[in-house]
Amino acid sequence: MKFFHLSDLHLGKRVNGFSMIEDQKYILQQITELADREAPDAVIIAGDVYDKSIPSVEAVNLFDDFLVSLAQRNLQVFVISGNHDSAERISYGGRVMEQSGIHISRRIIGGGSTSSSGSGEYSDSDGFASFENPAENLSASSLSVSSSSGGTDPGKISIVRLEDEYGAIYVYLIPYIHPSVVRAAWPEETVGSWTEAMEVLLRHADIDPEARNIAVAHQYVTADGVRPEESDSEQKHIGGLDNVEYSVFDAFDYVALGHLHGPQHIGRPTVRYAGSPLKYSFSEENQKKSVTVVEIRKKGDVGISQLPLSVLRDLKTLRGTFDELMSPEYTAALSKEDYYRVILTDEQDVDHAVSRLRKYFYTNLMELDYDNARTRAQGVTDALEEAIEKEPAEVLEELFLKQNGKAMSDFQKDLAARLIDEIWNTT
């Protein structure tokens, strides 16, 4: 089975007031063209389809067009809701769309049906036109859908069973979850942390570790306390309280993650964030956006590669004096269409700098900042005030993580706490 792994489309997003809809149309069309060239069997979209729980009409229409284009190519499509999405709105019409090979996660609710219940059998008993089961008409792919299940048990997640030349593959569609949702589904279980919530959810999914399994999830996943690379456009994670340890996914051959915008793996190469297809923050400007391509052959035989994406408009940071940035020599090598953040190094603020820069060349100027003696002094003051507000142990743990790339062990935390206590009590 060969599939594209995508996530964090954030359709309808605005960055600093600029609509990204045209950029999103461009990138989705490019992904469709890559599908024509690479001929995957399926496309996985690991959450945050939309940027808001109530998306704009433009965003909904764009996603509809994208799904139609994938279905027309006889691709199986797997979609889950992310923290930006409304699980109910994402899953609307999901049972009908299964007939076109589009499988969408359902909201997990305690005591209710939470998953796609399509069995691959469709009828027109209610007076509606019947549709062919897509598994019977996949001329462009060697992949077929043999069943899709979930039932009516509380908290059950969608599981789609596929067949290829190596046998069965199971795809588990896990929408963004909160521990409170899992507690409601299984009140008899002890669920404290986000990791425990995922453990309970997966335990009740009755996963066969000997089978070929794919998980699609949208969570903040860490490896032994080490935090992944993050960007400014993502939800902030305070102290790692909402982290899910990657080891809970040990039964899966590949874990298709969404939530973080930089492509990266966590813990092992097959637990992977695809990243967003577009840059949604200047903290992402150096990221290489791509489509993750995964091939699962026999059990344990997984190949991963990346296809680079080119953008309609790039995000770039420019730095210099106002006069430098306004000179024809400087702008000659730039694209007028790109999105810009300008950092002026003038010691004095420039009157009407934004309007003048936009009028001259930088039509898509998104941000303007200053870097001079005044702002650097203010930055030092702000950092000091922030540190003063924190507990000494918290400051030390943050410094240790930054310097060593891993969190302090319990022993190190206890030792640090004793030393801090001794210092504070002797001064």
Image (spheres, rainbow, N blue to C red):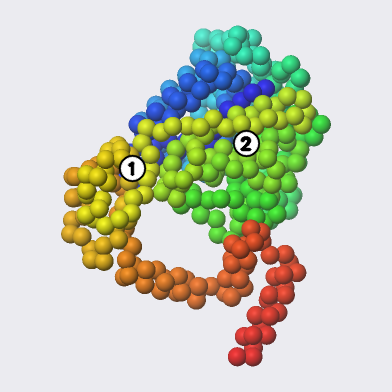
Asked if one can make out residue 98 in the rendered structure from this viewpoint, the answer is: no
Q: Residue at x 27, y 46 (%)?
A: 330
User: What crowding class fits label 1: few (fewer than 14 Cα within 10 Å), some (14-19), or many (20 or more)?
Assistant: many
> Which of the labelled discs sits on residue 248, or is there none?
none
Q: CA distance from mark 1 to mark 2?
A: 30 Å
Q: Is residue 184 left or right of residue 357?
A: right
Judging by the rendered image, the residue that carries numbered circle 2 is: 256
Of the pair 65 and 125, the residue shown nearer to us: 65
Snapshot quadrant of residue 351: bottom left
> Which of the labelled discs sits on residue 339, or is there none?
1
How many numbered discs sit on the rendered protein? Answer: 2
User: Relative to 180, does residue 91 appear above or below in the rendering?
Assistant: above
The quadrant of the image that shows the C terminus is bottom right
User: Relative to 308, does residue 373 appear above or below in the rendering?
Assistant: below
Pick out the residue farthest to the front. Answer: 329
Q: Amino acid at mark 1?
A: Tyr
User: Relative to 194, does residue 12 appear above or below in the rendering?
Assistant: above
Q: Position of residue 388 (x, y in %)?
A: 50, 76
Asked if one can make out residue 163 in the rendered structure from this viewpoint, the answer is: yes
Q: Position of residue 385 (x, y in %)?
A: 45, 74
The quadrant of the image that shows the N terminus is top right
Q: From the image, state whether disc 1 or disc 2 is nearer to you.
A: 1
Determine whether label 1 and label 2 are within 8 Å by CB.
Answer: no
Q: Position of residue 50 (x, y in %)?
A: 45, 37
Q: Residue at x 72, y 73 (%)?
A: 414
